[in-house]
């Protein structure tokens, strides 16, 4: 999370990069003063990351949410994602309930594989970025699918190691990433990934 959040803010922020990264700041040590360090625009990544969240307000809103609908207690993990969006994304004009993708080509590929999704469901990177987020993730699934996603995931792991061991025994130097990419489409694994992943039912057993 420590590396993912800044990279997502940089890639998808709805504010100019000049404000986001405060590129007008001096790098001359003799000109770095207390007054200069005290200046931090509210649209800068530094301000958004360093600002202390209003814990009392978040707690009050969550209690109110539960009181108005007691069933919300069973979706308490949504409080975490809502808090992340309010603290990090909202100040930088990143909308909620969106998937992200790295390019228009990738977006089109996702839409071809998932006709139920629409182009408006996704965010594309800003035009002036010079890097893309790199996120390490284990899996994303839901209990509501009767563990179909997890079952497919386990098939991928088993098949990947089977191919890996065959290649290794034949004297090759197997590349697990290449193996995963070559077989994952067979098991329905090409699903969109939200930009916030909650720990509600994520399990990390990715041996590669």
Image (tube, rainbow, N blue to C red):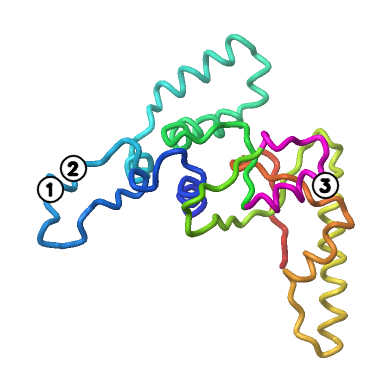
Contact between labelled residues 2 and 1, with CB atoms less than 8 Å apart: yes
Q: Which residue is most to the top?
A: 68
In the rendered structure, the answer to whether residue 68 lies left or right of residue 19 reads right
User: Where is residue 40 drawn, in percent x and y?
Assistant: 25, 41
Task: Give the magenta-colored segment's residue range.
Answer: 103-121
Badge 2 crowding class, 10 Å Cα cut-off, few under 14, some 14 to 19, many 20 or more, is few
Question: Looking at the image, which residue is at 49% across and 18% down?
Answer: 61
User: Where is residue 107 drawn, in percent x and y?
Assistant: 70, 47
Please tell me whether residue 111 belongs to the stretch shown in magenta.
yes
Q: Tell me the quarter of the picture where residue 161 sits.
A: bottom right
The disc placed on residue 38 is 2
State which tag comes first along the sequence, 2 or 3.
2
What's the distance in space between the residues labelled 1 and 2, CA to CA? 6 Å
Question: Looking at the image, which residue is at 75% across and 71% down?
Answer: 178
Badge 1 crowding class, 10 Å Cα cut-off, few under 14, some 14 to 19, many 20 or more, is few
User: Where is residue 155 drawn, in percent x and y?
Assistant: 87, 58
Question: Looking at the image, which residue is at 35% across and 49% down?
Answer: 21
State which tag comes first along the sequence, 3 or 1.
1
What kind of element bears circle 2?
helix
**Which numbered mark, 3 or 1, is in the foreground of this view?**
3
Contact between labelled residues 3 and 2, with CB atoms less than 8 Å apart: no
Note whether 83 is above or below 207 in the view shown: above
The disc placed on residue 113 is 3
**Residue in front for this viewpoint, 10 or 150:** 10
**Which numbered mark, 2 or 3, is in the foreground of this view?**
3
What's the distance in space between the residues labelled 2 and 3, CA to CA? 49 Å
In the rendered structure, the answer to whether residue 104 lies left or right of residue 132 reads right
User: Where is residue 59 drawn, in percent x and y?
Assistant: 46, 22
| Residue with the mark numbered 1 | 34
């Amino acid at each position: 999370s420590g590396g993912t959040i800044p990279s997502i803010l940089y890639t998808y922020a709805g504010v100019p990069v000049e404000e986001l990264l405060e590129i007008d700041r001096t790098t001359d040590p003799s000109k770095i003063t207390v007054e200069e360090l005290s200046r931090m625009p509210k649209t800068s990544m530094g301000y958004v990351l360093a600002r202390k969240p209003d814990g009392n307000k978040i707690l009050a809103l969550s209690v109110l949410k539960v009181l108005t609908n007691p069933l919300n207690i069973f979706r308490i993990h949504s409080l975490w994602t809502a808090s992340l969006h309010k603290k990090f994304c909202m100040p930088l004009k990143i909308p909620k309930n969106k998937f992200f993708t790295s390019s228009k080509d990738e977006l089109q590929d996702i839409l071809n594989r998932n006709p139920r999704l629409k182009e408006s469901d996704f965010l594309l990177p800003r035009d002036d970025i010079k890097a893309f987020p790199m996120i390490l993730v284990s899996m994303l699934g839901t209990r509501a699918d009767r563990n179909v996603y997890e079952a497919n995931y386990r098939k991928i792991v088993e098949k990947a190691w089977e191919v890996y061991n065959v290649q290794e025994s034949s004297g090759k130097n197997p590349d697990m990433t290449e193996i995963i990419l070559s077989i994952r489409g067979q098991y329905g694994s090409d699903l969109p990934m939200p930009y916030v992943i909650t720990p509600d039912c994520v399990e990390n057993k990715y041996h590669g």
